[in-house]
Image (tube, rainbow, N blue to C red):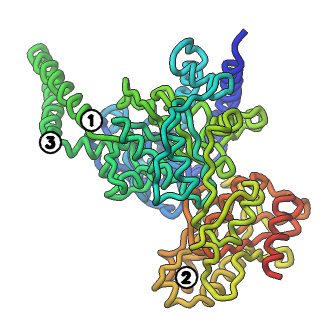
Amino acid sequence: MPALPILELQRQYELLKLEYNYEKELFLQQTDRIDVDKKVRKGICWYPLSIGRSYYNSLNQFVVEIFRTENEDIDHHFEFGRPVLFFDIDTYNNKTRYVSFTATVNYVEDNRMVVILPDSESLIQLQNMLHPGIQLSFDENTFKLMFASLNAVINDKNGRLSELRDIFHGTRPATELTFSPIRFPWLNASQEKAVNKVLCAKDVAIVHGPPGTGKTTTLVEAIYETLHRENQVLVCAQSNMAVDWISEKLVDRGIPVLRIGNPVRVNDKMLSFTYERRFESHPDYPLLFGMRRTIRQLYETMRKGHAESIRQKINSLRDRADELEMRIHESLFCEARVVACTLTGAANKLLFRQHFATLFIDEAAQALEAACWIAIRKAGRVILAGDHCQLPPIVTCHEAMKGGLAQTLMQKIATNKLECVSLLNIQYRMNDAIMRFSSQWFYHNSLQSAPEVKYRGILDYDTPIEWINTETSDAEEEFVEYSYGRINKAEAELTLKHLETYLNKIGKQRILEERIDIGLISPYQAQVQYLRRQIKKRSFFTPYRKLITIDTVDGFQGQERDIIVISLVRSNDKGAIGFLNDLRRMNVAITRARMKLIILGNAATLTHNTFYKQLFEYISSLED
């Protein structure tokens, strides 16, 4: 009879299979049934596009540049590592023809993308296209990695993996080292305690960081101190953006970081610590580049005859090139104190045979358990940081969700091993009135505001939070077919009207001098895109455009602004609020604001839900 942890992981495996089958079927349906224009608007397709230059990159992969030539302002989901398909449209017959190969995104910046092709022959298919486009393909690889990792953990008998499995799932105690706590005068008491708990942990520790409590600061300090005891650590997160964020903070602390994979937030600083850029900058790289170029030239010559003598030259040169490549690779890893990548990136061939004493997983509450095990297989102990009261993992299959697939490893360990958890309880972001409701609803009223932010505000005698009730303004929601989401145009107009009024109260000169920044948030992508279009049309907002960010709740994770305006969209007689029922997303939305939070929503629709009813009453009490 298998032990309880193995049964739990077997259950996870079956739930993951449900999710895999559901996602694959959904992707195929959307690919087959919706036209290119809808795919473009959903952000899964670029069309039309132009093909740029092709070349071998520093890692000897054959890549091609492509450029989006229309619809440049539409958000998309292309990022490093995603599989893609090229297609050609016969405009005469309106038929779509797909290429015979799958490619991989190497790099995306604005409307330029670099794509890894399987070989140079693949380029011929692209060059023969009259009306080329590119779309995301179903990501089989990520699921394969998660299935393989769960199998490895289930089948491990007496190794470290089986020990961690039994500790995480409650049948084995977590152990600690014993030493006198270290003082960190620049941290608060809860942050200092968390760093010490990380240093003491032999197996696992959790840093639970509610909004604004300095989770990243604490995690960076914990990594810095760990590196006084260990030569190198692995730092992972679910998303590329989260990896970028923690990597940048580590670099700011003076820690040498080697980033596996390309960053989402493309700038010179971020690129400078990627494996690819470091590889290109190595003193031996020009010699390696010359060898590879000679090998390719010899292959071309071999096609014309004298195959045997040329093959010997190629084999000799390739052996020397492989040896030099390995030397550069080892040099880069020897120089790095932190290796940073996504959870799935931990399976990258560049990390083959690499093992780390400690793995840090940031934003662990956003990651499926199976994804965490991909990275855990490379480590001896695990430190998880995040907040399970904010964004959850994305699970699309209702049956898998109901079965518990979205319950994260961090949640399970926190439940089984409460003694391993450190809660950060002092927040440095929000006016106390903005923070208080979140603290009451999500954190058992345990958060406190630091004195320097407790009463922060923009205007004198201003209420920090407002709810603009749209129920009497004919603001009706609409279903948007291309995004399978919702839009409320009248509420968007009210949103911009109220923002304009508030900015006028502050004054243009002060806003620009103090660089008061503004975030417009909506849970619905269609509403976000509509707001972006309307802001561009209005001359009033022209001076402030660099200070205004408009995005979904997910897009604002980890960010903050002086002013946050939220458009909730839903407005109907039934009280139906869809995925606004996921209250963790609302926790993210309402805790982005430093000094002013304005919420627009139909109170009659939303207050059918207890959370929104209490939030509405709380805000009303502040205004009395």
Q: Nearer the viewer, residue 489 or 380?
A: 380
Q: Position of residue 412 (x, y in %)?
A: 68, 35
Q: Is residue 280 above or below residue 159?
A: below
Residue drawn at the location 51% of the way across and 80% of the way down: 544
Using the rendered image of the protein, determine whether residue 64 is visible from the camera's viewpoint. no
> Which residue matches tag 1?
334
User: Label 3 vs label 1: CA separation?
Assistant: 15 Å
Q: Is residue 17 left or right of 320 when viewed as pictured?
A: right
Q: Is residue 73 above or below residue 176?
A: below
Query: Label 1's element?
Result: helix
First reached walking from the N terminus: tag 2 or tag 3: 3
Q: Is residue 519 above or below residue 379?
A: below
Kindly check if marks 2 and 1 are in contact, taking CB atoms under 8 A apart as contact.
no
Few, some or many C-alpha atoms within 10 Å of disc 1 (few <14, some 14-19, many ≥20)? Answer: few
Residue drawn at the location 65% of the way across and 34% of the way down: 413
Mark seen at residue 541: 2
> Which residue matches tag 3?
283
